[in-house]
């Protein structure tokens, strides 16, 4: 009575298990079926927080949102120069303080309605509304009264410098000429959303309504949302309403939340992905040696550096800071630990930021470093009170910190300890400036040196070093924006950056590169400084395969 | 029986309440908040965000408001995934994780019981040492080591099995289930070996042999029932443990289950999500403990009488 | 009729004290001796590491990078060009310390708690068990992560946190042992002699519950080491460049295709230790079971 | 030809600690339709020899070294495991000592009952069930059809033994091996089971091999008796012959050890040391609202210097009564005055003080000694605890205790498991005496011991009682033992006292029916001796 009854469900379960688990054979890979059907399988790093352009922050979100929506102007993936998006053209007036966007009358929402200038006014109202809590609201701060409105100093949105002159004409008034403003139109926080759709599910400023779900969402990009399985995949399909649909080659894209980089690489090798978000560092040498390698690496608009708390001994002494910086063999670091996946950096702004090259004020010079340290009172490390490097838990940060720790030990004979903290604790410490040395990375929001240099204005939110110099502030905040020419502006930037590096509140370490594995069947992905991908240019070609050595 | 279960359930309520309270205040005392970003957030924006999520209220008011929502089954909105409620996230992941846990458990059971019983039949011989050594390896092998090994061998070198996904490609459920089940298989093997050894030394086994029963029948009909009761008692906690412990496996195999949220939520300071998963998991743990206690008691005729249900 | 103590002891037949006896039996168990020897070896190595390690612990040779085993580096080098053998030796210090200390914490709390709950019974037992239910119901992974997050990390706290999680099962086992021992007549005899409950637990109950406790202890040590590795992996454990076997394994696992020796050697060290522990534990249990050995 | 002819059987066990010869060339036979009894104390090898020939000892460590065992002309020792299996349960069936542990608690009675039939004979389940119910009725189970689906735990020990017997007989075996089938049972039940076995043997004409440690039990029913000692057969013969003219000294020793005689009521001075009034000890089992009234309204006096016998069957509450007097069981109601003080209300130090004055000797010396403490530690504990002596005098005090209980002093560093049962009971007695108590509860102190040892321990208790001036409550289920040692006797039945009086009065002129049935069930072997 007991025995069969007890074991029957177990047996049944086992049978079910066998049925469900086996049915073996790997079948057709995603790449093969994708190439046939025009579906791109895209490793997207992680599950997006959401798809609301005014709510989310982050890179994975960016990829999906920019597939679903389109800004007034988009970046050309080869040159990063602006090209028409929703706006077919734009004009500057009042010495560049007023921009008039002429919207493409053919621009359509995915429900067939026209994208109008008043949609933009409504959307920017939402993006700047104090109750929305848009963390990227500052993207619109060049607009007159935008910042004041967000901070509640201006309560009437009509006073903000954005007007719909008619259905297709949008006029934007800026505080000052802002050369990079057009670039910002490709950032999702400046995108338009469909007002009626949002209002159907809640107030304008609500953060969490289901308006972005499949079936609800109305967007204006080359693709529209087809499936959103949490933590599994997001599928977008080609939109038949998109104004430039003839240029779109892909029938759809599948975004995978590939959190684990090692797994992502394996998926790529098994032809489950066309494209990986990153490449595990240890795999890079192997990939590099392949003929026709799918590994692509290119400079990225970002700098990896160590923050220094300039008020805490021993690093309150500029000589110590310089000694630390000069004793770092960046070339060696890049060659070994980083496997040539970075470029040594000697300043904060990445080289060739729209033609701007930062000054190089120092070099690897251990002798001078030792001398500086001795001058600061620690000859050959004697009397060194100790130093702690703070970094957030991540393999890459660990490796760099471990290597740097040893470099300082061997070059300067000083003891350095490491403190790795989980993300939020690390953020808390960095924000409170409660550290001696902390790792930091900055990825540009737009291609302009200003985006890097204005980090270090006095009490800047992302300064985090106690660095403060009124002359520097004046250069960045007042003199550079008023510069008449690009050359003049860049000269002022160079001046400021030289001052910064002479005080050394940060130790620049390297300039980022981005690394992807891209299947040979993918065409139309171009390397650029922003790692900016416009899916409407991407094409899939059949009958191309991964190198034999990989399989 | 019913009364026994009811009493156990009632006892569970304060337990869960304490768990919620402890977690609530523990989470809140952690440094950093849900809206801290690498690029600093403008104070006005941060205030607006906190207002949207009731974080501007005094802590005790937040606590009671949370309990009020919880009483109505509402775990609140996720901080990390705006637009998703915690309920929604949990229930989208639960079926997958439950399925994964079930397979892992079935694998663990079939391998574990088989190995344990085989070992118990010839204690201190090769037939004992080999499965038990394997079990020891299973216990010692962390899943983040077992997984790459399995993937490398079966997924890459042999190319037999898919290495990621869940239900996308036939066979993609095998590796994660084995990876997750391995440690439990090992525990079950040890448990069933011990249980069987205990039972096999009982007098009634001698009685069964004296009746002229074949060894197979002695083991399957007379010894297994009693010998596997410890295993049954272990299944409840094990299943709850599988659900809670699927984090590594789910991340590595890109499985859209619950496990990926647990640890991430703590790192993200996604308060509602942490609380939601804690409440959900504690309830599961308590529930499965009760279930396995009841089943184990029910399997034992002596205890079944005590449960009051009769036969 | 007075007999001096010396007399008495001199006349005493070659008696066997519990531990002496256990030791004799243990020595006959080859596997247990092997396990004990390996473990001892590991511990000695761990203790002596700062003096006998072939290389300095921190010395890197970035340009050398990861190399397979060679005459200069018997077990190869890692990506920083550090000697793997040295890393394993230093890692062993942490792993063994975490394993033993956290398990000791778990043992201490668990055995005390379980013994009291099981012996006193009644309302005290009910309250203690409810408390355990609560801790059981806490999803412990989140719990530990939160603990580490809230209180910051140091290695002592790590020991405590892990011990605090692992003692629960220990307490359960102890409690059920004590409950059955409590029914035994020798405990009743102790009561009738007028011994206090604390003395009874200490002298009569705990020593007789050692067997299952030892076995569970040998199971706890591996899980503690793995937990440490997992926490370190999440960045909640020990601080680099300090390392542990679990951490070495988890790094090694990521590069197992490129640098298999980074996985194989730490993995072997851990596995060997845990096997030894297991053999020793089983052997100890058998050796301490004075009753079983007679028949 | 004999049904079973065992010749020169030798069995040994090979363990880590060396080879132990359990059976050293034993020969005996069982004739058809007769009962052969093997008598011996624990460790004599009597069970091992029977199990060995049926392949029921685990091998290794067990090993058959030699000899033959012809069953119905067939050499059992040469059979394969499969062939032996055919015989087991079909031609040769077994009953074991402890019916509590020999039935599978996870299977219904019926399922276990029909199993041998289903395995060995081609019968349908329905037929098997019919047969099983018939048999259950035959062995005296009431309403067998409804009990068919019950689990073992729902039965008392006696009933389970009946089920075991039915199970053994279901295939109509030709030989029944009964291994101490009555030892674990109460006396009245014991008599019934013996009678049942004898009756079934006569009715079915089967051979029975009856293994027992109790000469008195088998005296009535056996046709032949084999006496074994330490793996060797020392004597065999007909019961009459054996009882009247034992040849081997060991047999004589066994016979002498059967408790006999009656103590003379010498000094019953009506000076009560303990006065119990309206004592109730009730237990509340979990999940049940009905309390178990283990001791229900008992009043009694225990006089200074007497040995008061307390008889009753298992479950009568006699042990609980003893424990209640010592505050080892929680008293629900009533009072226990010890030397004028009500001990039920004592706590803390006063209680500890009284604990010194009253001690207990337990039934099972294997369970009542802490297996992980040496004799020295065991004896030292009470001495130090109550300050009977200081550290300096400790060795001397322990040596004296060892002498008193008849243990060689050189055993002092040994552990309980290294002693035999009798020696352990001596240690336990020593521990009880260590506190120099005035009152001792002896709870079945000899019932777990072999008969020869029983006699020694009883002698010891008697002697020490005099020397230490003890008052004793002697709890036992064994009437013969009680008669031998007690001055007065109390009979307990279902929590209540139903009879009391001097030993002579109770034994010669019992008042209650229950007492009479107790007396009637004493195996006649005792009387014969």
Image: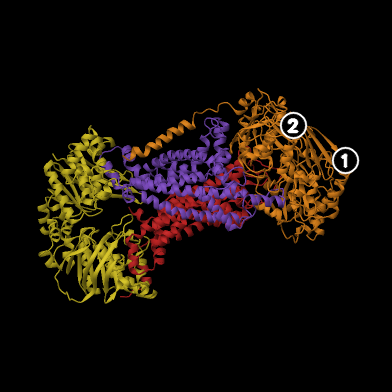
Task: Identify the colour of chain A in the image.
Answer: orange
Real-space Cα distance between discs 1 and 2?
34 Å
> Could you say which disc has been placed on residue B289 in the image?
none
Which image quadrant for residue B111?
top left
In the image, residue A58 lies at what x, y percent? Answer: 68, 42
Report the front residue among A320 and D234.
A320
Who's red, chain-wise? C
Residue C59 visible at all: no
Q: Is residue D401 above or below residue A327?
A: below
Q: Quadrant of the N terminus of chain D?
A: top left
Residue drawn at the location 23% of the way across and 68% of the way down: D473
Q: Which residue is mark 1?
A: A95
Chain identifier of the residue bearing label 1 in the image? A
Q: Is residue B181 above or below residue D343?
A: above
Which image quadrant for residue A191?
top right
Q: Which residue is mark 2?
A: A526
């Amino acid at each position: 009575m007991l025995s069969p009854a007890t074991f029957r469900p177990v047996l049944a379960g086992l049978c079910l298990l066998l049925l469900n688990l086996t049915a073996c054979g790997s079948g057709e890979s995603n790449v093969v079926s994708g190439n046939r059907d025009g579906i791109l399988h895209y490793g997207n790093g992680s599950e997006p927080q959401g798809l609301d352009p005014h709510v989310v922050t982050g890179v994975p979100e960016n990829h999906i949102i920019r597939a679903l929506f389109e800004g007034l102007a988009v970046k050309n993936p080869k040159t990063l120069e602006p090209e028409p998006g929703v706006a077919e053209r734009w004009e500057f007036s009042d010495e560049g303080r007023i921009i008039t966007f002429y919207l493409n009358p053919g621009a359509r929402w995915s429900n067939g309605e026209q994208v109008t200038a008043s949609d933009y006014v409504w959307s920017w109202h939402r993006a700047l509304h104090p109750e929305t809590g848009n963390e990227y609201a500052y993207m619109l701060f060049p607009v007159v009264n935008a910042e004041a409105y967000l901070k509640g100093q201006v309560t009437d949105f009509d006073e903000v410098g954005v007007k719909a002159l008619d259905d297709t004409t949008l006029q934007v008034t800026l505080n000052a000429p802002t050369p990079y403003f057009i670039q910002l139109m490709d950032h999702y926080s400046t995108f338009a959303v469909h007002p009626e759709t949002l209002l159907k599910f809640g107030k304008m400023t609500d953060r969490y309504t289901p308006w972005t779900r499949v079936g609800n969402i109305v967007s204006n990009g080359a693709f529209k949302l087809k499936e959103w399985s949490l933590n599994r995949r997001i599928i977008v399909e080609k939109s038949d309403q998109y104004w430039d649909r003839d240029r779109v080659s892909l029938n759809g894209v599948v975004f995978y939340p590939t959190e684990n980089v090692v797994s992502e690489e394996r998926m790529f090798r098994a032809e489950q992905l066309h494209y990986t978000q990153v490449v595990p560092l240890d795999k890079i040498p192997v990939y590099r040696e392949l003929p026709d390698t799918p590994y692509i690496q290119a400079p990225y608009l970002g700098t990896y550096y160590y923050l220094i708390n300039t008020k805490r001994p021993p690093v309150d002494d500029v000589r110590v800071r310089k000694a630390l910086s000069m004793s770092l063999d960046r070339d060696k670091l890049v060659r070994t630990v980083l496997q040539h996946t970075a470029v040594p950096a000697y300043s904060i702004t990445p080289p060739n930021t729209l033609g701007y090259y930062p000054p190089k004020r120092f070099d690897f010079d251990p002798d001078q470093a030792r001398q500086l340290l001795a001058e600061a009172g620690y000859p050959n490390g004697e009397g060194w009170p100790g130093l702690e490097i703070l970094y957030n838990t991540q393999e890459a940060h660990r490796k760099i910190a471990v290597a740097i720790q040893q470099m300082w030990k061997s070059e300067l004979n000083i003891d350095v300890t490491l403190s790795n903290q989980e993300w939020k604790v690390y953020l808390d410490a960095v924000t409170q400036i409660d550290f001696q040395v902390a790792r930091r990375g900055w990825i540009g929001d737009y291609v302009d040196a200003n985006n890097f240099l204005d980090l270090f204005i006095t009490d800047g939110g992302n300064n985090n070093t106690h660095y403060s110099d009124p002359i520097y502030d004046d250069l960045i905040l007042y003199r550079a924006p008023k510069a008449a020419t690009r050359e003049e502006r860049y000269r002022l930037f160079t001046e400021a950056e030289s001052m910064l590096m002479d005080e050394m509140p940060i130790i620049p370490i390297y300039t980022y590169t981005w690394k992807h594995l891209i299947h040979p069947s993918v065409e139309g992905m171009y390397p650029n400084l922003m790692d900016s991908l416009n899916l409407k240019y991407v094409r899939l070609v059949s009958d191309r395969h991964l190198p034999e050595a990989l399989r | 029986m019913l009364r026994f279960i009811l009493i156990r359930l009632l006892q569970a309520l304060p337990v869960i309440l304490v768990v919620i309270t402890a977690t609530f205040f523990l989470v809140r005392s952690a440094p950093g908040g849900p809206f801290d970003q690498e690029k600093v957030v403008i104070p006005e924006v941060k205030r607006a965000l906190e207002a949207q999520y009731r974080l501007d209220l005094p802590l005790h008011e937040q606590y009671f408001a949370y309990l009020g929502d919880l009483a109505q089954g509402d775990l609140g909105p996720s901080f990390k995934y705006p637009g998703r409620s915690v309920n929604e996230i949990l229930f989208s992941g639960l079926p997958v994780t439950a399925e994964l846990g079930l397979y892992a458990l079935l694998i663990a059971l079939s391998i574990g019981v088989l190995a344990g019983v085989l070992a118990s039949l010839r204690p201190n011989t090769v037939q004992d040492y080999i499965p038990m050594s394997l079990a020891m390896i299973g216990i010692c092998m962390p899943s983040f080591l077992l997984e790459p090994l399995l993937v490398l061998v079966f997924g890459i070198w042999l190319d037999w099995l898919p290495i990621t996904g869940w239900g996308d490609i036939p066979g993609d459920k095998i590796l994660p289930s084995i990876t997750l089940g391995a440690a439990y298989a090992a525990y079950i093997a040890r448990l069933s070996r011990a249980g069987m050894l205990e039972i096999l030394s009982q007098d009634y086994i001698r009685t069964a042999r004296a009746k002229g029963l074949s060894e197979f029948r002695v083991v399957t009909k007379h010894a297994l029932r009693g010998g596997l009761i410890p295993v049954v008692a272990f299944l409840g906690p094990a299943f709850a443990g599988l659900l809670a412990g699927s984090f590594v496996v789910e991340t590595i195999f890109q499985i859209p289950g619950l496990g990926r949220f647990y640890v991430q939520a703590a790192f993200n300071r996604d308060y509602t999500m942490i609380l939601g998963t804690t409440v959900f998991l504690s309830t599961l743990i308590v529930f499965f403990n009760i279930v396995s206690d009841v089943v184990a008691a029910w399997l034992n005729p002596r205890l079944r009488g005590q449960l009051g249900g009769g036969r | 009729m007075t007999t001096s103590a010396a007399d008495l002891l001199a006349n005493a037949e070659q008696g066997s004290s519990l531990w002496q006896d256990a030791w004799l039996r243990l020595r006959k168990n080859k596997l247990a001796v092997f396990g004990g020897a390996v473990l001892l070896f590991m511990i000695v190595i761990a203790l002596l590491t700062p003096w006998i390690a072939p290389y300095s612990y921190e010395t890197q040779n970035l340009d050398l990078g990861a190399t397979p085993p060679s005459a200069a580096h018997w077990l190869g080098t890692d990506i920083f060009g550090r000697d793997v053998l040295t890393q394993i030796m230093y890692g062993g210090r942490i792993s063994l310390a975490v394993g033993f200390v956290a398990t000791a914490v778990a043992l201490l709390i668990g055995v005390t708690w379980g013994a009291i709950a099981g012996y006193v019974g009644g309302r005290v037992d009910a309250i203690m068990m409810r408390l355990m239910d609560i801790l059981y119901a806490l999803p412990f992974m989140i719990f530990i992560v939160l603990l580490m997050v809230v209180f910051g990390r140091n290695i002592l706290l790590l020991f405590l946190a892990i011990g605090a999680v692992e003692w629960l099962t220990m307490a359960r086992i102890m409690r059920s042992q004590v409950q059955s021992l409590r029914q035994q007549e020798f405990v009743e005899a102790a009561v009738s002699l007028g011994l206090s409950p604390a003395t009874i637990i200490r002298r009569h109950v705990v020593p007789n519950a050692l067997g299952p406790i030892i076995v569970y202890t040998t199971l706890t040590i591996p899980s503690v080491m793995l937990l440490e590795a997992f926490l370190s992996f999440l960045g909640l454990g020990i601080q680099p460049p300090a390392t542990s076997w679990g951490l070495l394994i988890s790094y090694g696992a990521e590069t197992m295709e490129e640098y298999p020796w980074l996985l194989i050697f730490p993995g072997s060290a851990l596995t060997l230790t845990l096997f030894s522990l297991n053999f020793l534990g089983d052997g100890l249990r058998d050796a301490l079971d004075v009753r079983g050995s007679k028949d | 030809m004999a049904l079973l002819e065992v010749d020169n059987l030798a069995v040994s066990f090979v363990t880590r600690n060396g080879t132990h010869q359990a059976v050293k060339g034993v020969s005996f036979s069982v004739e058809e339709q007769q009962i052969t009894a093997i008598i011996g104390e624990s460790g004599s090898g009597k069970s091992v020899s029977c199990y060995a020939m049926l392949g029921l000892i685990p091998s290794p460590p067990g090993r058959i070294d030699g000899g033959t065992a012809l069953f119905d002309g067939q050499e059992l020792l040469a059979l394969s495991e499969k062939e032996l299996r055919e015989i087991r349960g079909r031609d040769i069936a077994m009953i074991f000592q402890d019916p509590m542990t020999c039935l599978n608690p996870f299977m219904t009675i019926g399922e276990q009952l029909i199993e041998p039939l289903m395995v060995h004979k081609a019968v349908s389940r329905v037929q098997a069930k019919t047969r099983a119910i018939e048999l259950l009725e035959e062995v005296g189970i009431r309403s067998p059809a409804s009990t068919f689906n019950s689990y073992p735990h729902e039965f008392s020990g006696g009933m389970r033994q009946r089920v075991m017997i039915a199970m053994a007989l279901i295939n109509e075996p030709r030989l029944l091996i009964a291994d101490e089938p009555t030892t674990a049972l109460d006396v009245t039940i014991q008599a019934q089971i013996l009678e049942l076995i004898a009756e079934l043997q006569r009715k079915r004409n089967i051979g029975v091999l009856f293994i027992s440690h109790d000469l008195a039990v088998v005296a009535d029913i056996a046709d032949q008796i084999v006496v074994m000692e330490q793996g060797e057969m020392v004597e065999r013969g007909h019961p009459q012959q054996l009882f009247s003219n034992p040849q081997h000294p060991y047999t004589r020793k066994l016979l002498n050890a059967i408790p006999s005689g009656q103590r003379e009521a010498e000094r019953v001075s009506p000076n009560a040391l303990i006065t119990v009034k309206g004592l109730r000890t009730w237990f509340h089992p979990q999940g049940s609202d009905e309390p178990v009234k283990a001791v229900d309204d008992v009043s009694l006096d225990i006089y200074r210097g007497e040995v008061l016998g307390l008889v009753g069957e298992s479950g009568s509450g006699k042990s609980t009564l003893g424990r209640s007097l010592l505050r080892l069981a929680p008293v629900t109601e009533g009072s226990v005055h010890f030397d004028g003080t009500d001990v039920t209300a004592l706590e803390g130090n006063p209680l500890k003080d009284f604990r010194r004055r009253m001690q207990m000797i337990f039934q099972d010396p294997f369970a009542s000694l802490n297996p992980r403490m040496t004799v020295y530690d065991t004896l030292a504990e009470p001495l130090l605890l109550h300050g009977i002596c200081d550290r300096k005098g400790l060795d001397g005090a322990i040596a004296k205790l060892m002498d008193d209980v008849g243990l060689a002093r050189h055993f002092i560093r040994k552990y309980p498991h290294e002693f035999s049962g009798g020696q352990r009971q001596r240690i336990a007695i020593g521990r009880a005496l260590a506190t120099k108590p005035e009152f001792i509860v002896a709870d079945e102190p000899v019932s777990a011991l072999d008969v020869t040892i029983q006699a020694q321990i009883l002698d010891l208790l008697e002697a020490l009682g005099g020397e230490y001036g003890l008052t004793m409550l002697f709890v036992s289920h064994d009437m013969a033992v009680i008669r031998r040692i007690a001055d007065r006797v109390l009979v307990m039945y279902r929590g209540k006292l139903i009879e009391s009086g001097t030993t002579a009065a109770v034994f010669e002129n019992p008042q209650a029916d229950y007492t009479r049935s107790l007396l009637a069930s004493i195996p006649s072997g005792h009387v014969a001796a």
